[in-house]
Image (spheres, rainbow, N blue to C red):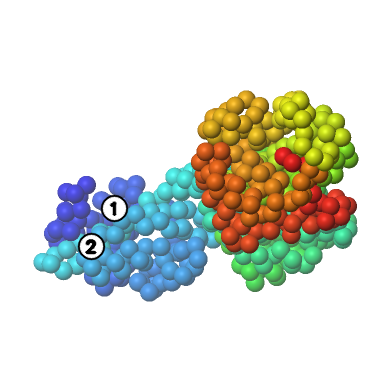
């Protein structure tokens, strides 16, 4: 490689003559063009004609180095202009510039352009420009990038619309099409299509009120047909298409020459993915097939997302039912659990835990005292000190809660939070006497929030001790009873003005409980 580069820079006038020989040029499969020291086009081989088209080369031959406007995808300059100018200006090679050929009489091709200055006595004698057809390689690379983006969106997205938007973005960024938008059958206008997301140019999204009815002219186009018949429709010559005549003027103004529409389910309704591009014949069978594959992947991802959301809804419903069981029997315990859940989530969020885990910690805290439904109400609400036997009975609520939540097949760490929230780092807790990191982090978080909430509010057997005394308790037990990092985070929150009661009011009103009553609970 180094020898080739050196030879191109140090080539002699005789070598330039050999390269400019027509017989030599036509023997090459690689497109090759010759320019003189002024940048004027002097000749090319047959491979260049086959690749670029005779019309474009005729324009170059007549206009010389100043020819503009037909060779690059965005219509600004010829694809070899930049490498040629660089070689003329610097006398150095310029290799591997990727560009597209968008000539109306040939299929769009992606090419790799390189320029090689021919030197004579230290000055540029001329420039050889090589053109390699890399369409297949470029297409494979871009389609792989599309699939990668789609799969990433499926894994990362939390909702359907985000996933669909990622598909539109990938089509315009990776495949470089001008426009991609997704529409869905309207619930408000009969046979209308409402756009829900888009990327790139959006000239056609609301043009002419696109319909999918087969009884009106505006429903006969490729977009309406794709939605109505739920099949892929390709129109590679939009400006010549009779069925898309209602939008011909819009397409002419926008410069769209090709369109493709694919059926896609959106929010459980019929929808359509519409892709537009300036180049005619932009959608060959390979591209169509790969985009269809990406849509199928997205649909699978959305179905999976819907299933996960349904499971989450089922989980929330189960937790609400369990919490309601506690609330019906003892509304004070429910108020306590709500506040512990809020504080636990605030601590977990501040500690930088993943949002999904933060949610699960909050859900576990919402039912961490569910086992108290097995404790007689008169013991839970009795004023005064409990007997040793009664206290041992109270302690069983951790194991009972674990059994209830495990039997409901609730995900980790919800049952573990109920089981371990009274464990302590020095193994002095119950029910299992776990030590240190044997206690899961979610339970260590809920343990701190539980103590702070319980001490801050009145109990049947004592008055409220207040937030300051509660914070003093966790500060004193930091690293011995309670997780040090959790304690530090909790203290930071209260230093910044965290208010247990203010946060509990909204939840209390949602549940129909007096906000003042909701600040009460049973000692955790």
Q: Disc 1 on helix, strand or loop? A: helix
The total of numbered circles placed on residues is 2
**What mark, if any, has residue 458 been given in the picture?**
none
Q: Position of residue 133 (x, y in %)?
A: 41, 50
Relative to 331, say whether 193 is above or below.
Answer: below
Circle 1 is placed at which residue position? 25
Distance, label 2 to label 1, CA atoms, is 22 Å
- Please report the residue visible at 51 percent of the width from the left and 41 percent of the height from the top: 479
Q: Is residue 157 visible?
A: no
Foreground residue, 211 or 507? 507
Q: Disc 2 on helix, strand or loop? A: loop
- Please report the residue visible at 74 percent of the width from the left and 59 percent of the height from the top: 502
- Please report the residue visible at 27 percent of the width from the left and 55 percent of the height from the top: 22
Q: Position of residue 254 (x, y in %)?
A: 63, 69
Circle 2 is placed at which residue position? 92
Relative to 372, say whether 23 is above or below.
Answer: below
Foreground residue, 301 or 43? 301
Q: Quadrant of residue 315?
A: top right
Q: In the displayed structure, does residue 491 sit left or right of residue 364?
A: left
First of labels 2, 1 by sequence position: 1
- Please report the residue visible at 40 percent of the width from the left and 56 percent of the height from the top: 98
Q: In the displayed structure, does residue 469 sit left or right of residue 183?
A: left
Q: Position of residue 43 (x, y in %)?
A: 31, 62
Q: Quadrant of residue 67?
A: bottom left
């Amino acid at each position: 490689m180094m020898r080739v580069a050196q030879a191109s820079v140090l080539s002699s006038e005789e070598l330039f003559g050999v390269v400019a020989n027509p017989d030599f040029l036509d023997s090459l499969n690689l497109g090759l063009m010759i320019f003189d020291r002024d940048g004027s086009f002097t000749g090319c081989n047959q491979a260049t004609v086959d690749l670029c088209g005779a019309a474009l080369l005729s324009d170059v031959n007549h206009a010389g180095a100043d020819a503009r406007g037909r060779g690059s995808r965005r219509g600004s300059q010829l694809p070899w202009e930049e490498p040629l100018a660089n070689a003329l200006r610097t006398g150095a090679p310029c290799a591997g510039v990727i560009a597209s050929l968008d000539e109306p009489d040939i299929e769009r091709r992606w090419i790799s352009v390189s320029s090689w200055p021919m030197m004579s006595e230290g000055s540029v004698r001329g420039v050889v420009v090589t053109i390699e057809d890399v369409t297949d390689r470029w297409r494979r690379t871009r389609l792989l990038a599309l699939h990668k983006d789609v799969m990433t969106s499926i894994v990362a997205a939390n909702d359907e619309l985000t996933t669909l938007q990622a598909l539109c973005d990938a089509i315009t960024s990776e495949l470089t099409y001008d426009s991609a938008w997704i529409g869905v059958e309207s619930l408000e206008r009969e046979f209308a299509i409402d756009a829900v997301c888009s990327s790139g140019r959006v000239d056609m999204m609301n043009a002419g009120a696109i319909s999918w009815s087969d009884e009106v002219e505006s429903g006969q186009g490729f977009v309406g047909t794709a939605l109505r018949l739920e099949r892929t429709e390709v129109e590679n010559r939009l400006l010549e298409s009779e069925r898309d005549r209602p939008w011909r003027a819009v397409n002419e103004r926008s410069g769209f020459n090709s369109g493709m529409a694919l059926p896609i389910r959106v929010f459980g309704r019929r929808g359509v993915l519409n892709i537009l591009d300036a180049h005619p014949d932009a959608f060959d069978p390979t591209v169509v097939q790969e985009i269809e594959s990406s849509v199928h992947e997205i649909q699978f991802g959305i179905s999976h997302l819907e299933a996960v959301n349904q499971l989450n809804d089922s989980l929330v419903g189960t937790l609400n039912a369990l919490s309601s069981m506690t609330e019906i029997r003892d509304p004070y315990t429910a108020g306590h659990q709500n506040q512990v859940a809020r504080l636990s989530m605030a601590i977990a969020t501040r500690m930088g835990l993943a949002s999904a885990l933060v949610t699960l910690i909050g859900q576990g805290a919402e039912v961490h005292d569910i086992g108290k439904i097995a404790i007689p109400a008169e013991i839970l609400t009795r004023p005064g000190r409990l007997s040793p036997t009664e206290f041992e009975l109270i302690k069983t609520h951790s194991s009972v809660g674990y059994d209830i939540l495990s039997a409901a097949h609730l995900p980790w760490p919800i049952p573990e939070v109920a089981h371990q929230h009274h464990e302590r780092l020095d193994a002095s807790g119950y029910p299992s006497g776990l030590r240190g990191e044997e206690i899961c982090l979610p339970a260590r978080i809920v343990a701190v929030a539980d103590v702070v909430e319980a001490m801050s509010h009145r109990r049947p057997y004592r008055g409220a001790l207040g937030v300051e005394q509660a914070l003093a308790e966790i500060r004193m037990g930091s690293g011995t009873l309670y997780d040090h990092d959790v304690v530090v985070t909790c203290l930071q929150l209260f230093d910044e003005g965290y208010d247990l009661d203010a946060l509990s009011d909204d939840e209390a009103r949602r549940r129909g409980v007096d906000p003042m009553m909701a600040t009460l609970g049973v000692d955790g």
